[in-house]
Image (cartoon, rainbow, N blue to C red):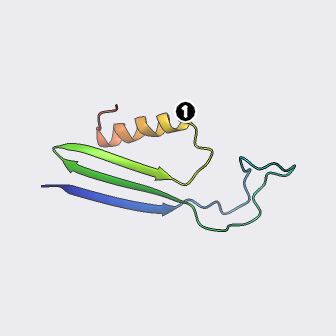
Amino acid sequence: MIKLGYAETDITPKIPVQLVGFNRTDNTSRGVLKPLFAQVSIWESGNRHCLITIDSIGFKKKLADILRIKVNNILKIRLP
């Protein structure tokens, strides 16, 4: 038997934020073209697996490692 779970949440900032990757003096956001989301899928078939997606261009490895550890502590998933 396979167990599967999925969740999605809107992570679109409610206020202007500093942007990454723009070549202009003011790197502050000027509105929202499309909403941003974080999504998680967890499935279990003998072992437990988790896939997380985050709409973020500035999500660095250090922050991803922190997220991996926190998810592992909650779900008890073996880290690669």
Q: Position of residue 80 (x, y in %)?
A: 34, 31
Density class for disc 1 (Cα within 10 Å; few <14, some 14-19, many ≥20) is few
What residue sits 81% from the left and 48% below the top?
23
What residue sits 58% from the left and 51% below the top?
56
Q: Position of residue 70 (x, y in %)?
A: 42, 39
Q: Which of the 4 quarters of the picture holds residue 28?
A: bottom right
**Quick one: which residue is furthest to the left in this view?**
1
Q: Position of residue 61 (x, y in %)?
A: 54, 34
| Type of amino acid at the residue the image marks with label 1 | Lys
Q: Secondary structure at mark 1?
A: helix
Q: Is the N terminus in the top left, top right, bottom left or bottom right quadrant?
A: bottom left
Q: Which of the 4 quarters of the picture holds residue 77?
A: top left
**Number of callouts:** 1
| Image side of residue 42 versus residue 29, left or right | left
Q: Position of residue 72 (x, y in %)?
A: 35, 38
Q: Which of the 4 quarters of the picture holds residue 48?
A: top left
From the viewer's side, name the closer residue of 15 and 33: 33
- What residue is shown with label 1? 62
| Image side of residue 50 versus residue 46, left or right | right
What residue sits 35% from the left and 54% below the top?
41
From the viewer's side, name the closer residue of 50 and 9: 50
